[in-house]
Image (cartoon, helix red, strand yellow):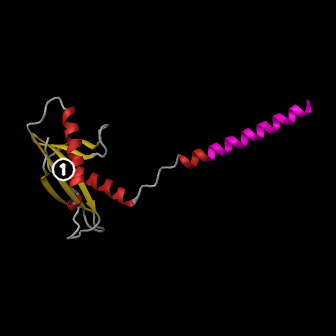
């Protein structure tokens, strides 16, 4: 009988250690992941762009829209009157005349945006009469208010 008590005590101690280890692992794994600075900058730029478009009279209907069929996302989708606008936001923390924010929208990015935009259109009950793909550059320079450069119809929408 004494052997059974010792075995139970050892079993309980082992179980308790396992539960503590599980609790520590859960605590460690449940921490919010650290977001790299460039992603925080991009997210802040999209927030600024969203409100800039709204102040300019656009009706924003989607942010970071994703398709289950294609990789990537559309930063903002908005209506400018009767024109559906897919807006790619590019954010920088400083201006550089050779490496502009809008210059980062290369051909590969334009192809991905076209695929996503056409996937979005297929979900609409009726296609819009007018549509365009814009690029909105956001500059978040330290000590200055956000600055914007808007390029309507910067990307040719085919399809």
Q: Quadrant of residue 68?
A: top left
Q: Position of residue 28 (x, y in %)?
A: 57, 49
Q: Position of residue 85 (x, y in %)?
A: 16, 45
| Residue at the limit of the structure toward the right, as seen here | 2
User: In this orientation, does residue 49 appear?
Assistant: yes
Q: Is residue 136 left or right of residue 36?
A: left
Q: Quadrant of the C terminus?
A: top left
Mark 1 closeness class: few <14, some 14–19, many ≥20 residues within 10 Å? some
Is residue 4 within the magenta segment?
yes
Is residue 144 within the magenta segment?
no
Q: Quadrant of the N terminus?
A: top right
Residue tagged 1: 53
Magenta region, main secondary structure: helix
Q: Tag 1's secondary structure?
A: helix
- Residue at coordinates 24% horizontally, 52% vertically from top-left? 109
Please give the range of residues in magenta. Answer: 1-24
- Residue at coordinates 30% horizontally, 68% vertically from top-left? 142
Q: Position of residue 20 (x, y in %)?
A: 67, 44
User: In this orientation, does residue 147 appear?
Assistant: no
| Residue at the limit of the structure toward the bottom, as seen here | 97
Q: Nearer the viewer, residue 148 or 107?
A: 107
Q: Position of residue 88 (x, y in %)?
A: 22, 51
Q: Nearer the viewer, residue 155 or 10?
A: 155
């Amino acid at each position: 009988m004494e052997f059974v008590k010792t075995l139970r005590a050892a079993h309980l101690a082992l179980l308790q250690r396992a539960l503590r280890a599980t609790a520590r692992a859960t605590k460690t794994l449940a921490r919010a992941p650290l977001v790299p600075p460039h992603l925080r900058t991009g997210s802040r730029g999209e927030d600024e762009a969203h409100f800039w478009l709204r102040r300019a009279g656009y009706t924003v209907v989607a942010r970071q829209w994703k398709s289950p069929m294609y990789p990537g996302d559309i930063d903002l989708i908005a209506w400018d009157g009767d024109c559906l606008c897919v807006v790619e936001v590019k954010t920088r923390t400083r201006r550089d005349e050779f490496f502009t924010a809008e210059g980062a929208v290369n051909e590969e990015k334009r192809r991905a945006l076209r695929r996503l935009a056409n996937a979005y259109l297929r979900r609409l009950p009726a296609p819009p009469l007018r549509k365009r793909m814009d690029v909105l550059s956001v500059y978040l320079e330290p000590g200055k208010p956000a600055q914007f450069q808007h390029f309507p119809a910067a990307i040719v929408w085919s399809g």
